[in-house]
Image: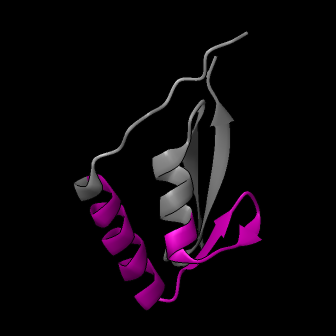
């Protein structure tokens, strides 16, 4: 049986990510997790408790290079 790696997170990292994402939301940026609209709290939880994967950010901007959307995409690590 394969042992699962548990990645324990620093609460300060979770707060920093939460604050960063909230600032994007205030600027009108939409947040998505795996292609679905998502709340800031859900993204922070997914990123902080991920066990065998990490989330990569995919930034989507408009013609003036203003970030309009951030999609968090799961990347499986081997």
Residue 58 higher or lower than 52, as above or below? below
Report the residue at 55% width, 42% height from top. 50
> Residue 9: x, y in percent?
35, 44
Quarter occupied by the C terminus: top right
Q: Which residues are magenta?
A: 13-42
Horizontal arrangement in the rendering, residue 57 relative to residue 1 (left or right): left
Q: Is residue 74 visible?
A: yes
Q: Residue furthest left?
A: 12
> Residue 45: x, y in percent?
51, 59
Report the residue at 50% width, 72% height from top. 41
Q: Is residue 16 magenta?
A: yes
Horizontal arrangement in the rendering, residue 35 relative to residue 74 (left or right): right
Report the residue at 76% width, 69% height from top. 36
Horizontal arrangement in the rendering, residue 25 relative to residue 50 (left or right): left
Q: Residue furthest right?
A: 35
How is colour applied across the structure in the image? one colour
């Amino acid at each position: 049986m394969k042992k699962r790696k548990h990645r324990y997170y620093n609460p300060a990292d979770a707060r920093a990510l939460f604050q960063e994402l909230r600032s994007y939301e205030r600027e009108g940026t939409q947040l998505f997790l795996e292609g679905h609209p998502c709340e800031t709290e859900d993204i922070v939880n997914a990123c902080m408790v991920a066990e065998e994967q990490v989330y990569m950010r995919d930034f989507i901007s408009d013609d003036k290079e203003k970030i309009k959307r951030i999609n968090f995409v799961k990347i499986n690590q081997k």
